[in-house]
Image (spheres, grey):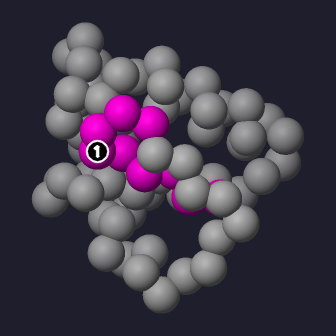
Amino acid sequence: MGTEEMEAVILAGILCRGGTDVTLASVEDVLEVEVSCGSRIVVDTHIAACADQVFDLVALPVTDILFSY
């Protein structure tokens, strides 16, 4: 909760438009995360579900949303 939304959506958007498979994961207990200005981002999964996967890139913007590619 409280992540800067521009750091979250710009990075994911650029990578998606470039054809990259992007997974948004959160450390929060819910999949709908309220970000800094009160808007909401719905992530794909909880971070624990990613523990057994291998990613080419992991980006950690601000506090609680993890981008894994």
Q: Position of residue 46 (x, y in %)?
A: 31, 65
Q: Amino acid at mark 1?
A: Asp
Q: Is residue 8 above or below residue 54?
A: above
Q: Quadrant of the C terminus?
A: bottom right
Residue 29 is left or right of residue 47, and the answer is: left
The extreme left residue here reads 29
Magenta-tinted stretch: 61-69
Q: Residue furthest bottom?
A: 52
Q: Position of residue 24 (x, y in %)?
A: 47, 52
Left or right: where does residue 46 sit relative to residue 7? Answer: left
As drawn, 31 above or below 37: below
Quadrant assignment, res 22: bottom right
Secondary element at image label 1 = loop
Measuring 84% from the left and 48% from the top, which residue is drawn there?
Answer: 19
- Seen in the picture, residue 13 relative to 54 is either above or below; the reply is above
65 in the magenta segment: yes
Name the outermost residue toward the right: 18
Q: Quadrant of the N terminus?
A: top left
Residue found at x 40% / y 57%: 25
**Residue 38's image quarter?**
top left
Q: Residues within 10 Å of mark 1 (few under 14, many from 20)?
A: some
Q: Was residue 1 drawn as part of the magenta stretch in this picture? A: no
- Kindly identify the residue that appears in the image at 61 percent across and 38 percent down: 12
- Disc 1 designates what residue? 64
Pick the front one: 8 or 32: 8
- Is residue 40 visible from the viewing direction of this image? no
Q: Nearer the viewer, residue 59 or 29?
A: 59
Q: Residue 28 appears at what percent x and percent y?
A: 19, 53
Q: Which residue does the image show at 24% across and 19% down from the upper left?
A: 36
Q: Is residue 34 visible?
A: yes
State whether residue 65 is above or below residue 6.
Answer: below
